[in-house]
Image (cartoon, grey):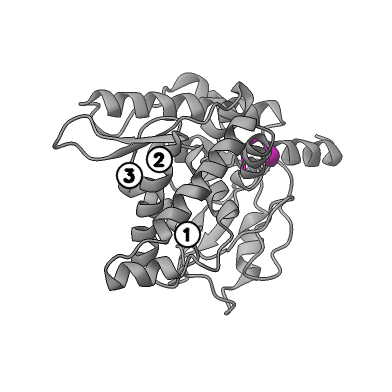
């Protein structure tokens, strides 16, 4: 396929599936929604009232860290993060994900404060916090009325498909190989550093051209590797399988040649970046990938 066309496809994929871009789409929607602007004003007033009260010393200290923050930006950040939860998500999981937006030095303090902020902002009805029974876990679900295109973007935003053009050269620990955004090459929140992580090795692996085995994908059906013993597991599996085949079709329609990017963990071990299409997944996932540039092996017994 023409190189220029490959770059056009790749830029389209990143703008459609990357949260780096989808965050911006959600912010634009919120900025242009009179109802959401009202909820932001209401949220600011609720937070100011909550922050002006006296609590126990450690809570007062945590709230004091919010005094220098722009509350409009904070409330907007919470709404942007919450918008991704189209279905019920555990409150503990949501607060852990949202904590990084505050930038506190102490992660535990950040999670506690986010949990309290969300309990306050829940009163705006931008999202619900609830539980099915007295003994159930708290869950969060968004009430933000996104349009169908944004919902589709969010549904498929968890993981980017592989690159369909050659990745950009990695030049430091905060480059990604993608065309439109950068990211840390070290896995795990809080693990980023600027030390040596052998960028030359990552660049070499990133440029190995791969393809999907269409014969395999057309003749073998992907099956779960765990028991579908609950309705939640069945729903999660069906969603994952549907998304996987959507990405198989996307890669095939864009020329069936792709590159998997790679990152390192804090011990230096290399991991392929990918979820629906990856060389480090189940046996099915591994079997579905082959080298794009095939060669006959000779001299092998």
Where residue 218 appears, as percent x and y from the top left, is: 51, 20
Q: Residue at x 61, y 24 (%)?
A: 147
Which residue is identified by label 3? 91
Instruction: Select label 2 or label 3 by which is in front.
Output: 2
Q: Is residue 294 above or below residue 264?
A: above
Whether the magenta-drawn stretch holds residue 166 is answered as no
Which residue is identified by label 1? 100
Instruction: Select label 2 or label 1 by which is in front.
Output: 2
Which residue is identified by label 2? 122
Where residue 262 appears, as percent x and y from the top left, is: 56, 57
Q: Is the magenta stretch mostly helix, strand or loop?
A: helix
Where residue 13 appears, as percent x and y from the top left, is: 68, 37
Where residue 276 appears, as percent x and y from the top left, is: 49, 37
Whether the magenta-drawn stretch holds residue 16 is answered as yes
* Residue 199 picture quarter: bottom right
Q: Alpha-carbon distance for marks 3 and 1?
A: 15 Å
Q: Can residue 78 be seen in this view?
A: no
Q: Is mark 1 on a helix, strand or loop?
A: loop
* First to last magenta residue range: 14-18
């Amino acid at each position: 396929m023409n190189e220029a066309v490959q770059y056009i496809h790749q830029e389209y994929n990143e703008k459609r599936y990357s949260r780096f871009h989808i965050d911006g789409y959600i912010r634009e929607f919120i900025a242009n929604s009179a109802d959401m602007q009202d909820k932001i004003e209401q949220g600011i007033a609720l937070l100011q009232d909550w922050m002006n009260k006296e609590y126990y010393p450690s809570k007062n200290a945590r709230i004091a860290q919010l005094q220098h923050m722009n509350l409009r930006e904070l409330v907007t950040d919470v709404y942007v993060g919450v918008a991704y939860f189209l279905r019920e998500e555990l409150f503990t999981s949501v607060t852990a994900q949202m904590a990084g937006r505050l930038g506190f030095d102490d992660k535990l303090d950040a999670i506690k404060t986010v949990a309290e902020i969300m309990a306050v902002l829940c009163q705006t009805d931008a999202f619900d916090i609830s539980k099915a029974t007295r003994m159930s876990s708290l869950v969060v679900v968004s009430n933000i009325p996104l349009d169908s295109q944004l919902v589709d973007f969010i549904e498929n935003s968890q993981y980017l498909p592989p690159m369909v053009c050659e990745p950009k050269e990695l030049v430091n620990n905060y480059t990604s190989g993608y065309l439109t955004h950068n990211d840390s090459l070290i896995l795990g929140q809080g693990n980023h550093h600027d030390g040596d992580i052998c960028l030359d090795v990552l660049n070499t692996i990133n440029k190995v051209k791969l393809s999907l085995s269409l014969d395999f994908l057309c003749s073998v059906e992907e099956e779960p590797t765990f028991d579908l013993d609950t309705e939640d597991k069945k729903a999660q599996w069906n969603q994952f399988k549907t998304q996987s085949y959507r990405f198989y079709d996307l890669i095939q329609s864009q020329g069936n040649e792709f590159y998997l990017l790679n990152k390192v963990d804090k011990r230096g071990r290399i991991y392929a970046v990918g979820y629906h299409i990856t060389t480090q997944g189940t046996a099915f996932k591994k079997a579905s990938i082959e080298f794009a540039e095939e060669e006959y092996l000779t001299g092998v017994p």
